[in-house]
Image (cartoon, rainbow, N blue to C red):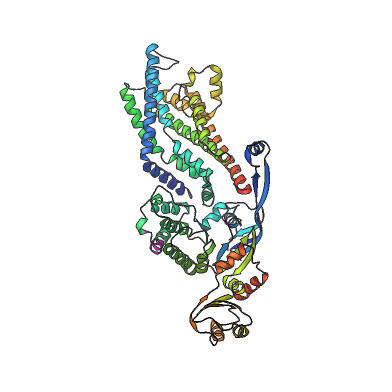
Amino acid sequence: MPLIEASGLTKKFRQAVKEPGLVGSLKHFFTRKYRDKLAVDHIDLSVEAGESVAYLGPNGAGKSTTIKMLTGILVPTSGRLVVDGLVPSEKRQQNARKMGVVFGQRTQLWWDIPVIESFNLARDMYEIPPKRYKENLGQFTELLGLADFMNLPAGKISLGQRMRADLCMALLHDPKLLYLDEPTIGLDIAVKDSIRKFIRGLVEERGTTIMLTTHDLGDIEDICKRIVIIDNGKIIHDGDLRALKDTYARDRVIHFQLARPPESMTPICAGLPACEIGSDGLRLSVRFDRFEHAAGEIAAAVMPYVEVVDFRIDEPEVEDLIRKVYLGQLTLSPAVEAAAMATEA
Amino acid sequence: MRGFRKYVSFARTSLEITFVYRAGFAVNMIGTIFYVVAMFYLWQTIFLGNPGALGGFTWPEMKAYLLVAFLLNSLLTWYQEWVMGEDIRQGVVAIDLARPIDFQASRFSRAIGPVPFEFTSALAVAAIVAFAFGGIALPADPARAGLFLLSAGLATMIKFGLVYCVSMAAFWTTGTEGLTVGRMAVQNIFSGALIPLVFFPDWLRAIAAVLPFQGMISTPALTYLGKLDGPTTALMLAVQAAWAVGLIVLGRLVWGRAVRVVTINGG
């Protein structure tokens, strides 16, 4: 049975609508008008234990709303949601015991007291057996490098330190499920790397199920195998990250720096009929499908006609792909999902 | 009791935070000391003009009354109320909803955590003031002192219940400062903190009798002084207990409703 199972999960918010200006404010004071906004629109999602899922989408797409329903903070408007055999919003406390959650924008640590005291409070809050608490605290302190600021209040430590301490706090009670809401937001590259490495370790060694929302594509490539994209409250892609790349991010571009302008483009173009070729003085670039051609083939087809001084290859970026999806320039088809299924199988 | 430990932990943490904000605590304390000393001089002047008893109070009794009021007002200071309002307003309560805790119980433990410290500091100040003004009336016997402590405990519960209900308003309004000031004004009058209720005109006393506020100052102070006979004391303590329970239950209902509104309609 999947750990998270959602079907037709929907969340409708009631928003107050106010006309602009003083008159609008007055009108609003007496007759309130509301408009329904579908934040999450009939999504189906199934996550198996031990999976690590990246949950992506532009701002306002419904990511956080979904996470809030999963954590039991919000009650779904309709649809079914079961997390590890419980309906989160009905069994809020029981659900809370089994999950950990880290909000990148908000700390769970107590601002005024030493970090270690926040951890001790978590121990009592989650009724963690003392022995287990000690083991976990020791391990996380070492892996996340918390020793230096363990005795400082959360208000006095840096954002990177705070994030690491927050991760520790969310994990002390051995949650089956960890929700990460933009965990690397605003962090420097070194801290990002150490946090990603730590989360990867969790998945591999503890089998923790991870659900991650982020705008940082690096997080996904490092941590998640599966990628779910939500836009306007609807899931528009759910599948393997590699399958997504293989379907939509197929083009590589090879750029040649030439010694002399080519005498004629005709033979080159004739040799590479399926490719898009651009030429500008001493520069020549060939865009090709990486499944159709090897870079070597392209080079071999070009070299007889020109003298190449240097070359480089642009790899397809997931980032470009996601950007296109967000901007509506690319519609993902069910084919990707089929490809994803095939890869999983 | 299982699950109780976490609330003890909340109380301890909250006490610790009070120590972090010791400067704020001290300033608040100094403010109330000035206030209580001013009240002392005011009532001293009144008693100098009317030697003997006034409204059934002798001067040593009145001094005791004022200090008991001061002591009870020093418990559950503004800090927790302010934090709770801010937490609701800024949506920090969402995090509380994702924790295995009962919201009201956790806030209650956070509120009473600093009480031992608040009580001892206020008691020390009260002792100094009492000494400076030539002593006060003391409880007649240990049983009376015990009854007073019980009544003071109930008064603290009522105060929490009230503060909690008022804080819940933060779900619907943008700020709770106004409400807090309003609550304190009404409370200062009807609790008997400014003037013992016996000095009120009948109609005002009748209003005070049906409000929860008298249980916050008047009842414990009169219990301390032994102004109430046995059956009346029992009745007044029962009224206090009823208000304490009633307000705490009301707080739970309001919270339940607020959470439904927030989690169903979106905050």
Image-based side of A145 in relation to A255, left or right: left
Q: Position of residue A126 (x, y in %)?
A: 48, 54
Give the residue at x 51% y 82%. A260
Side of B89 relative to A139 (left or right): right
Q: Is residue B59 visible to us here?
A: yes
The x, y position of residue A65, in whole percent, is 59, 54
- Residue positioned 56% across, 23% down in the render: B207
Quarter of the image where the C terminus of chain A is located: bottom right
Q: Quadrant of residue A83?
A: bottom right
Q: Main secondary structure of the magenta part?
A: helix
Q: Is residue A112 above or below residue A137?
A: above
Toward the viewer: A190 or B111? Answer: A190
Q: Is residue B143 visible?
A: no
The total number of labels drawn is 0
Residue at (41, 38) in percent of width and height: B115
Residue A265 is a magenta residue: no
**Residue at the bottom extreme, as displayed:** A304
Q: Position of residue B238 (x, y in %)?
A: 52, 30
Name above or below for residue B115 compared with residue A212.
above
Q: Is residue A201 above or below residue B46?
A: below
Percent position of residue A333, x then y = 67, 69
Quadrant that contains the N terminus of chain A:
bottom right
Q: Is residue A144 magenta?
A: yes
The magenta span reads A138-146
Q: Which residue is at the front of the view, A190 or A151?
A: A190
